[in-house]
Image: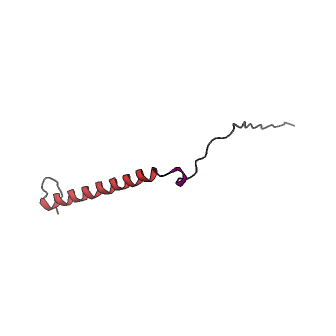
Amino acid sequence: MNHSIYSADRATHLKIVVVALLTAATVAGLGLSLYFRAKTSPAERTAVLTAGKPVAVSSSIVTFAR
């Protein structure tokens, strides 16, 4: 087992490159999948809540001392 990148042989470097390429392909595929999913028509997406009329809310805590 090669524990240092400086003393690593050709096979170890090849393994590192393959793992890096597979990771990059996975991240790119996931990103493209999410990008194209976001470009679907509005009818296919979930409903978006919009603000209605303004509402005034108040609270009053009244205490009476006896």
Residue under the image location 45 percent in, 50 percent down:
39
Quarter of the view holding residue 33: bottom left
Instruction: Name the chief secondary structure element in magenta.
Output: loop
Task: Decide: is 9 above or below 57.
Answer: below
The one nearer the camera, 60 or 17, is 17
Instruction: Check the image and name the residue furthest to the right.
Output: 66
Quarter of the view holding residue 17: bottom left
Region of the chain picked out in magenta, as a range: 39-49
Residue 9, given in percent of the width and then of the height, sits at: 12, 59
Quadrant containing the N terminus is bottom left
Residue 51, given in percent of the width and then of the height, sits at: 63, 41
The one nearer the camera, 50 or 13, is 50
Q: Is residue 2 in view?
A: no
Residue 24, given in percent of the width and then of the height, sits at: 29, 54
The one nearer the camera, 64 or 28, is 28
Quadrant containing the C terminus is top right
Q: Is residue 43 magenta?
A: yes
Residue under the image location 34 percent in, 56 percent down:
29
Q: Is residue 14 left or right of residue 58?
A: left
Residue under the image location 37 percent in, 52 percent down:
32
Q: Is residue 55 in view?
A: yes
